[in-house]
Image: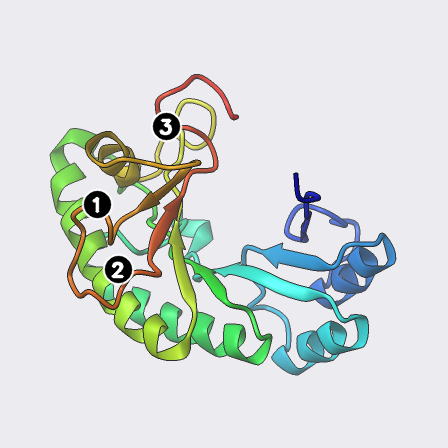
Amino acid sequence: MAPLKFCANISWLFAELPDFTQRIYAAASCGFQAVEAAWLYDCELQELQRARKATGVEVILINTPPGDVKSGDLGLGAVPGREKDFREGLDLAVRYAKALECKRIHLMAGRIPVDVNRSQVAKEMETVFVHNLTYAADILSKEGIMGTIEPINTRITDPSCCNTGEGWKAKYQATNGHLSLANNGWKPHTQHFKVFAHNRTCSDCPGPR
């Protein structure tokens, strides 16, 4: 079996250091050759570039911006009425990804709107999400960046997360925890083969794998 490769999620590790550039150096000093992060957008891009180049650490994944976290946002991809915000966030994520030579962007779906029943908005949110994924796939395929999505287990993570991926997982065949949208009926354009779902915690089991 090939040796396992690990990356440091510097959104959670080295949290005693206030700046992501410092966390990149810390990860490198601990022997990590790669890092990922949720949101780097409060950091100066040039400083992040310098840290990455100085350490030789690879940035393997970043998230699209979450929106207004203080107001309850945690991603905008599936949120009705926020399509413009999602596209602006995608543009920012692509700019950071290109500058950091990062080849993967997690396209965050978001949360069920406050005081709204999940069953009332599930279909609309899935429609919005697919529309935004189609738009993002066009952008990312031109930039050579892979877009990822993440079905969330709402029983052990955030119960308000939009878990549209659970329906896809039920409908389409998954392999090794990954759900290939392009190869399982989700074919807005044939060139979107790089858009896939990563299943961090199995959506139909009581805990993480």
Is residue 34 or residue 99 the one in the foreground?
Answer: 34
* Residue 195 in view in this figure: yes
Q: Earlier in the sequence, mark 3 or mark 2?
A: 2
In the rendered view, does 6 fall on the left or right side of 150?
A: right
Question: Which quadrant of the rendered structure holds the N terminus?
Answer: top right
Q: Amino acid at mark 3?
A: Ser
Disc 2 + disc 1, Cβ < 8 Å = no
Q: CA distance from mark 2 to mark 1?
A: 15 Å
Circle 3 crowding by C-alpha within 10 Å: few under 14, some 14–19, many from 20: many
Q: Residue furthest top?
A: 206
Q: CA distance from mark 3 to mark 2?
A: 20 Å
- Residue wearing tag 3: 203
Which residue corresponds to mark 1? 184
* Position of residue 194 in the picture relative to residue 206 (left or right): left
Query: Mark 1: which secondary structure?
Result: loop
Rendered residue at 35%/34% (across/down): 160
Foreground: 169 or 82?
A: 169
Q: Which mark is residue 133?
A: 2
User: Would residue 39 appear left or right of 197 to someone viewing this image?
Assistant: right
Q: Earlier in the sequence, mark 1 or mark 3?
A: 1
| Residue 133 vertical placement versus 181 (above, below) | below
> Which residue is painted at 39% across and 60% down in the image?
147
Give, as a three-letter code, the residue at label 2.
Answer: Leu
10 Å neighbourhood of mark 2: few (<14), some, or many (≥20)? many
Specify the amino acid type for callout 1: Asn
User: Measured from the top left, where is residue 189 in percent x and y?
Assistant: 17, 65
